[in-house]
Amino acid sequence: MRANKGRVPGNVDRIFSAGTSAGGALSALLGASGDSPIYDEYLLTTYMRPSATTYLAALSEADRKTYLAKNTFLTWDGKKATFTWADFLTHVGARKKDAPAFDLFPLPTDTSDTMTGDINNEFGLGTAPFRHFTLYSLRKDKGTSARLASDIPEKLRLMNPMYHLADKPNPGRTKHWWIRLGAADSDTSLTVSANLAAAANQLGDDVSHLYYWDAGHGANEDAGDFIAWIAKTSGYRP
């Protein structure tokens, strides 16, 4: 974008990247580069319960009564919602991806299938459309003596936003983050966005991170607030 200043519309020094699903991962990487139980209580108290509280508080009395009758794992005291982590996981349901979710074993063989092995495909090289990028999956697939290709560690650093936030903080990274995820998203681990938000917050960045209660994969429920945030952050007024 900046290399094409004057050729593309807008201010190339004020770039906002937004994405859904894999696009969200790429958006996080763009900003950063220019299931352990220790997270359970943190996720519950910081995100999940507040998300449920906001959702229930916005309902009418009749709708809230109906919702609570259908979702008995929730306790509502008139001001906030509480529930256990185990009950929340049951409410969300089974995950949609097998384990491992990304570095598959064995590697796919059908190159026309754009979804199965799509992450392995990102690491393809030359005539090899799919390659392993973790030692665990590689050795499960090829044997205990197999070794990762020498270029993989560098590619992982290039593609992982956490490298630019935690391993080697990048002074040129974006300082403003808007991160959203559906609390019922069974395609993406809820800790992914939490880790991203925590890492950016630890560096002192401006972070707005919320989960949409009962929303699934790719949810976008406060688009108007996002546009307002862009205007506030950029200082732009149409």
Image (cartoon, helix red, strand yellow):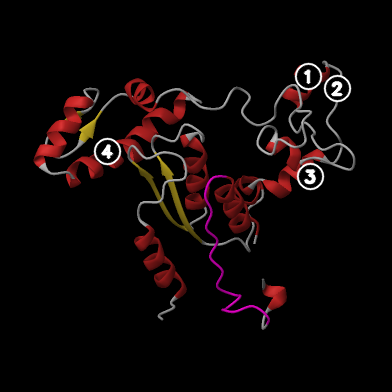
Foreground mark, 2 or 1, reads 1
Seen at 17% across and 44% down, the residue is 59
Callout 3 environment at 10 Å: few (<14), some (14 to 19), or many (20+)? few
Residue picked out by circle 3: 154
Q: Are marks 3 and 1 in contact (CB under 8 Å)?
A: no
Residue picked out by circle 2: 146
Q: Amino acid at mark 4?
A: Ala
Residue picked out by circle 4: 52
Q: Are marks 1 and 4 in contact (CB under 8 Å)?
A: no
Seen at 35% across and 44% down, the residue is 212
Going from N to C along the chain, the mark reached first, 3 or 4, is: 4
Q: Which residues are magenta?
A: 7-21
Going from N to C along the chain, the mark reached first, 3 or 1, is: 1
Foreground mark, 3 or 4, reads 4
Q: Is residue 137 above or below residue 224?
A: above
Q: Nearer the viewer, residue 71 or 151?
A: 71
Quadrant, the N terminus = bottom right
Q: Amino acid at mark 3?
A: Glu
Going from N to C along the chain, the mark reached first, 3 or 2, is: 2
